[in-house]
Image (cartoon, rainbow, N blue to C red):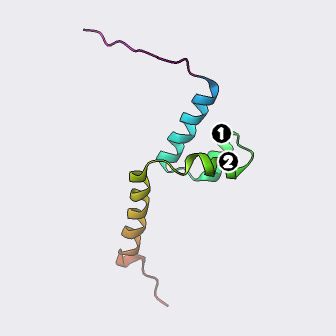
Amino acid sequence: MEATVVIHDPFTAHWLRHTFVTMMYLAGIDVLTAKEQAGYVDIQTIMAIYTHLDGAFKQKQIDKLDKYINNPSNIVAN
């Protein structure tokens, strides 16, 4: 049995750009790099559109900070 691919709406350059930036966000690419790669002029635009994505992803980012803070080898001695 062969799989059938169904595309309901034709994709556009805008849709492709949005997907690209979303993938960069989910991959952990910093917002300045994503802005430059996507060709946005204003960082506020990218911040307003993409920073609301994926609550689970945001929790993973906070977990990274917790792991770093709780690692004794990251303590700097004076």
Calculate the distance from the C-alpha at mark 1 to the C-alpha at mark 2. Answer: 11 Å
**Residue 5 in the image: x percent, y percent?**
39, 15
Q: Residue at x 49, y 47 (%)?
A: 53
**Where 5 falls versus 37 (above or below)?**
above
Instruction: Provide the residue designation for mark 2.
Output: 45
State the count of labels. Answer: 2
Quadrant of res 38: top right
The residue range painted magenta reads 1-11
Q: Is residue 7 located in the magenta-colored stretch of the structure?
A: yes
Amino acid residing under circle 2:
Thr
Q: Is residue 36 left or right of residue 6?
A: right
**Where 16 falls versus 66 (above or below)?**
above
Q: Is residue 40 left or right of residue 27?
A: right
Q: Check if mark 1's residue and mark 2's residue have beta carbons within 8 Å.
A: no
Q: Residue at x 43, y 59 (%)?
A: 61
- Taking depth in this image into account, of 11 and 26 the one nearest to the observer is 11
Residue that lies at the very extreme toward the bottom in this rendered image: 78
Q: Residue at x 32, y 13 (%)?
A: 3
**Where 31 falls versus 23 (above or below)?**
below
Q: Earlier in the sequence, mark 1 or mark 2?
A: 1
Amino acid residing under circle 1:
Ala
Instruction: Provide the residue designation for mark 1.
Output: 38
Task: Report helix, strand or loop for mark 1.
Answer: helix
